[in-house]
Image (cartoon, rainbow, N blue to C red):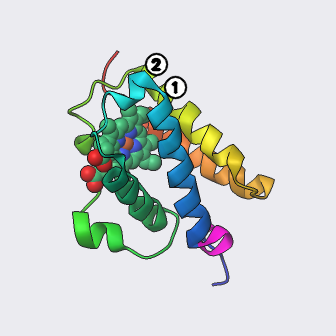
Amino acid sequence: NTSQTIYDLVGEEQIRLLTHYFYQEVAKNEDLKRLYPEDLLPAEDRLFLFLLQVFGGPETYSEQRGHPRLRMRHAKWKIDATMRDHWMTAMLSALDKLNLEQNIKEAMLSYFVNAANHMINHA
Ligand code: HEM
């Protein structure tokens, strides 16, 4: 099997940068920032490790945090379509800062659109 994962194609450094840019956007968005802990660095690390894993890299996230169960972990925040849009806008801005091949960017974007919709828990 020669199929390459997103992790193989973009590498750890790009995923590190993506999460860093994402949290810079979170810090700039009051509605989003209110949900997050005061110290964004540990949160940045959790998202980084999760994305490494979800895109086909090392499974350090689950070693440290257990099964992701992301929807359940997000149940304590009221996430409606507007909040989903804030999150997606932040992620899209972060993705735009990387110099990714269009097809890789689209693959990552479609994962995020799907996952973000799945996190909605409030009308
Ligand atoms: C954690 C909000 C979507 C992945 C968090 C946290 C907040 C949050 C406030 C706590 C930060 C921390 O301490 O780690 C939201 C909102 C979303 C959203 C408002 C809107 C749709 C997503 C999506 C993903 C994701 C789409 C996956 C791509 C994670 C992960 C954590 C996390 C991996 C850390 C979970 C843990 O191990 O505790 N999110 N999130 N989130 N989020 Fe989201």
Q: Position of residue 31 (x, y in %)?
A: 40, 22
Q: Residue at x 67, y 71 (%)?
A: 9
Secondary structure of the residue carrying numbered label 2: helix
29 vs 55: above or below? above
Horizontal arrangement in the rendering, residue 95 relative to residue 69 (left or right): right
Residue 85 is tagged as 1
Q: Residue at x 58, y 69 (%)?
A: 13
From this viewpoint, which residue is outermost toward the right? 102
Q: Which residues are magenta?
A: 6-11
* Kind of residue at disc 2: Thr
Q: Position of residue 109 (x, y in %)?
A: 62, 45
Task: Please indicate, yes or no, whether residue 108 appears anywhere in the rendered image.
Answer: yes
Screen quadrant of the C terminus: top left
Secondary structure under tag 1 reads helix
* Quadrant assignment, res 80: top left
Q: Quadrant of ligand 1?
A: top left
Contact, CB < 8 Å: mark 1 with mark 2? yes
- Label 2 beta carbon within 8 A of ligand 1: no
Our reading of the magenta stretch's main secondary structure is helix
Report the side of 45 relative to 63 (left or right): right
Residue at the disc numbered 2: 82
The x, y position of residue 33, in whole percent, is: 38, 31
Quick check: 21 above or below 68?
above
Observer-nearest residue: 110 or 102?
Answer: 102
Within-10-Å neighbours for mark 1: few <14, some 14–19, many 20+: some
Residue 66 seen anywhere in this rendered image of the structure: no
Residue type of the residue flagged with mark 1: Asp
Q: Position of residue 79 (x, y in %)?
A: 34, 26
Q: Quadrant of the N terminus?
A: bottom right
Q: CA distance from mark 1 to mark 2?
A: 5 Å
